[in-house]
Every structure is written in structure tokens, then in C-alpha cells.
Image (cartoon, rainbow, N blue to C red):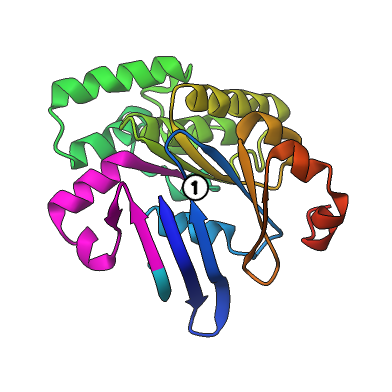
Amino acid sequence: MVCRDLSYTYLERFPALRQVSLTVCRGEKVALLGANGCGKSTLLKILDGLVFPDAGTFSAFGQPVTEDNLEDEQFSMGFRSRVGFIFQNSDAQVFSPTVSEEIAFGPLQMGWPRAKVEGRIGDVLEMLDIVDLADRAPYQLSGGEKKRVAIASVLVMNPEVILFDEPTAALDPRTQQWLVDLIAELGRGGKTIVMATHDLDVLDVVADRCVVFSEAHSIVAEAAPDELLSNPELLRSVNLI
């Protein structure tokens, strides 16, 4: 994924990104860091093709990702099958009557055969240890259970790139640790991970590289986790500590 000089403004007057350039390599784990409102979530939405920059370019898998291109069914299905986005708020992502139907939604939209979808649902339920939730309604689940279901609905597609927006926010400590371990495992399995986070304690596990945003909506530093954590002056300047 390659971003060049991306800028984005909400309502034509609230800047979210200012000339952001970023390259994410295959199999890399990248953490986006910065204070609330610095542009991390907006960048993730651009990487998922949910919004489009006012200026600059975004390419994925060697092809430009534009509104026009995503209106092409073949391009859109290829891109959507290769990139998955796990929102910060699981309630914004989980909407089907049962957990099984939730996990099946994406593959069925992609035209997968029902038999293949059923097999993948079973695999993902087992992988995330939520087999017992299969017939439950999402509104009956705890926050941690909803997060697992949201992740399952993405992993069922076996995407190459997984985008996480503040994945550990509002989770209990046990679920946080489970999720950190899962992200590390996905990275070892060759997935490309891009994650917006405030959680400095997990960087050495979930990231190969940290990209730091200023409150002026631009990238001010890139560093390995240990290098970043040994620079309190930088962390203070961007309101992370």
C-alpha cells in the first residue's frame, strides 16, 4: 500500500490529514500513533476505500484505489476480499440476527458458494474460540465477545491486509491480552497489519514500525517501537504521554 501526499478535510473546513505519505510493505506490522483527532482513523478509512482523499494518491497491490475504480465490480471485489477493517466500535460493524449470519455476510456478498462459506464459518468460530456463540444474537454479547465476532467477520475472508482501529480500547485486560496475542499471531502468519492505537505498552508485540502523527494532522516521525519508546520528548510533543 502506497500513500502519496494525502490530504483530507471534513466538511471542507476541518483538516484530518495534511500531505501524508506512507508505504506499507507486504507482511509488515505498522502502528499509527497520535493524539485523538490527529487523523489515524481517517487514514485507515482511506486504506479501506471508505473515504477518498481531497488531494494525493493511494494505491494498493500496484493499482490506484479511487472512487471510480471501486465502482468497477471486478476491481471492488478484488480489493474488498484482500483488505479487512475492524472498527473501534464493534456495534458499528456487527448487525446480523445471529453470529453465524454475521460471519457469513461478507463471503456471501462476494458470491462464495454456501458450502464453502459454512466451512469457513466453522474454522473461524473455532480459531477465535466462539463456537458457543454461533446462534446467539449480537446484542446479547459482551463487548469482548462482540469484538471477537467483528474480527471473525473479517478473518473469514482471509484478507491479506487487516486494519485495526484502536483494537484494545474499552476491553477488559484478559480480552486485551488475547487480542494482542492474536495480532502477533496474524503477523507471524504473513498478514499485513496496520493498527491505530494509543496503547504504548503493546507496541513491541504488535508493530515492526511506528508512524507518529502530530496534532497538526501530519506524520512527524517513523521509528521501531524500542526507538520510539526511548524518546519521551517526542511522545510528549505529540500528546501521547
Which residue is located at x 24 percent, y 17 percent? 119
Q: Residue 120 versus residue 48: which sits nearer the camera?
A: 48
Which residue is located at x 41 percent, y 14 percent? 126
Query: According to the image, label 1 marks what residue?
Result: 87
Amino acid residing under circle 1: Phe
The answer to whether residue 50 is visible is: no
Q: Position of residue 226 (x, y in %)?
A: 76, 36
The answer to whether residue 121 is visible is: yes
User: Does the stretch in magenta take in 60?
Assistant: yes
* Magenta-colored span: 57-86
Q: Is residue 140 above or below residue 123?
A: below
Residue neighbourhood size for the residue with mark 1, other residues' Cα within 10 Å, grouped as few (<14), some (14–19), many (≥20): many
Indicate the secondary structure of the residue bearing disc 1: loop
- Extreme residue toward the bottom, this view: 13
Q: Is residue 75 left or right of residue 82?
A: left
Q: Position of residue 138 (x, y in %)?
A: 44, 36
Where on the picture, by quarter, is residue 56? Answer: bottom left
Q: Position of residue 240 (x, y in %)?
A: 78, 54
Q: Residue 12 versus residue 220: which sits nearer the camera?
A: 220
Which residue is located at x 48 percent, y 16 percent? 129
Which residue is located at x 39 percent, y 53 percent? 48
